[in-house]
């Protein structure tokens, strides 16, 4: 979609670095979640603050800056997609505000960040795009790729909840 940093795409990008994050289900003894949050302009700031507090509590404060940038980009994409051209929130056909969830998990070797939302698929799915030098947006997923070992997206079957995730070693 023009201006949202999102475009229709149906594949997970290739790993951004030589060492890709393990994708299989593993024991992740550390878990924290936040949400549902209204997909409003205040959500990215709240998600960054939550992430910083959780990482400090887990002894992973060294990852706070990179994780904060990734979380900010992923939540901002949701907010942008949930905002109409007039700058007002888009409500669904039932009059509900789109929401997002943040999930953090770690096995102490890897840290997974997940941002989930309930936006309809026609509003787009994550896809990196080439931003022109004069564009004010469009570099977020490039930043996510640069800061993480791997990232991708999927849709939970049956409930149309989209998840965008990033993994850091």
Image (cartoon, rainbow, N blue to C red):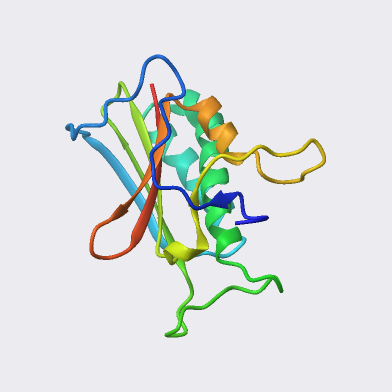
Query: 135 or 64, which lies in front?
Result: 135
Q: Is residue 116 left or right of residue 25?
A: right
Query: 1 or 17, which lies in front?
Result: 1
Quadrant containing the N terminus is bottom right
x and y percent of residue 164 in the render? 41, 46
Farthest right residue? 134
Compared with residue 131, is residue 95 higher up or lower down, i.e. above or below?
below
Query: 61 or 148, which lies in front?
Result: 148
Number of marks: 0
x and y percent of residue 15 in the render? 41, 25
Q: Quadrant of residue 84?
A: bottom right
Q: Residue at x 37, y 50 (%)?
A: 163
Farthest top residue? 18
Q: Quadrant of residue 22?
A: top left
Residue 91 seen in render: yes
x and y percent of residue 18 in the render? 41, 14
Q: Is residue 102 left or right of residue 83?
A: left
Residue 37 seen in render: no
Query: 125 or 147, which lies in front?
Result: 125
x and y percent of residue 54 in the render? 40, 40
Farthest bottom residue? 94
Q: Residue at x 49, y 23 (%)?
A: 62
Q: Quadrant of residue 27?
A: top left
Quadrant containing the C terminus is top left
């Amino acid at each position: 979609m023009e201006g949202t940093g999102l475009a229709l795409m149906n594949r997970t990008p290739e790993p951004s670095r030589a060492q890709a994050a393990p994708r299989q289900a593993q024991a992740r003894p550390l878990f924290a979640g936040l949400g549902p949050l209204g997909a409003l302009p205040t959500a990215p700031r709240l998600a960054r603050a939550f992430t910083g507090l959780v990482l400090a509590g887990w002894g992973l404060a060294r990852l706070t800056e990179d994780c904060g940038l990734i979380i900010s980009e992923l939540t901002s994409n949701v907010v942008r997609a949930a905002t109409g051209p007039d700058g007002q929130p888009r409500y669904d056909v039932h009059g509900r505000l789109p929401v997002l969830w943040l999930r953090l998990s770690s096995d102490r070797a890897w840290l997974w960040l997940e941002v989930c939302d309930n936006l309809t698929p026609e509003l787009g799915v994550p896809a990196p795009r080439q931003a022109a030098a004069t564009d004010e947006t469009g570099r977020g997923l490039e930043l996510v790729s640069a800061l993480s070992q791997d990232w991708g997206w999927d849709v939970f079957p049956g409930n149309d909840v989209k998840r965008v995730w990033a993994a850091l070693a």
